[in-house]
Amino acid sequence: MSNVGIVIVSHSPLVAEGTADMVRQMVGDEVPLAWCG
């Protein structure tokens, strides 16, 4: 099984956080997720 992680970078903290919330709903806790804005 390969390791996959997602990093979300945005000019806006709210956009980054909202996108991270949406991705978390799709992938659950199986994929590491980080965001910054």
Image (cartoon, helix red, strand yellow):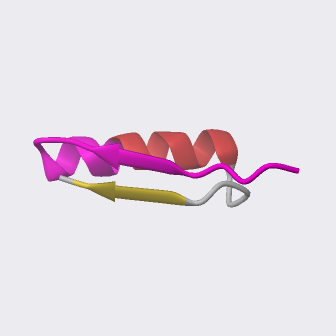
Instruction: Please give the name of the residue rendered at 34% of the width and 55% of the height, measured from the top-left corner.
Output: 35
User: x, y (%) of residue 16?
Assistant: 27, 46
Side of 17 where 2 appears, left or right: right
Instruction: Please give the name of the residue rendered at 51% of the width and 57% of the height, measured from the top-left corner.
Output: 33
The quarter of the displayed image where residue 30 is located: bottom right
**Total marks drawn?**
0
What's drawn in magenta, residue-wise? 1-18
Find out whether residue 3 is within the magenta segment: yes
Which of the pair 22/1 is nearer the observer? 1
Q: In this view, does 10 lie above or below 5?
A: above
User: x, y (%) of residue 22?
Assistant: 48, 40
Side of 8 where 23 appears, left or right: right
Which of the pair 9/25 is nearer the observer? 9
* Residue extending furthest toward the front: 2
User: x, y (%) of residue 4?
Assistant: 66, 49
The quarter of the displayed image where residue 29 is located: bottom right
Find out whether residue 15 is within the magenta segment: yes
* Residue extending furthest toward the left: 11
Side of 22 where 2 appears, left or right: right
Side of 31 where 19 appears, left or right: left
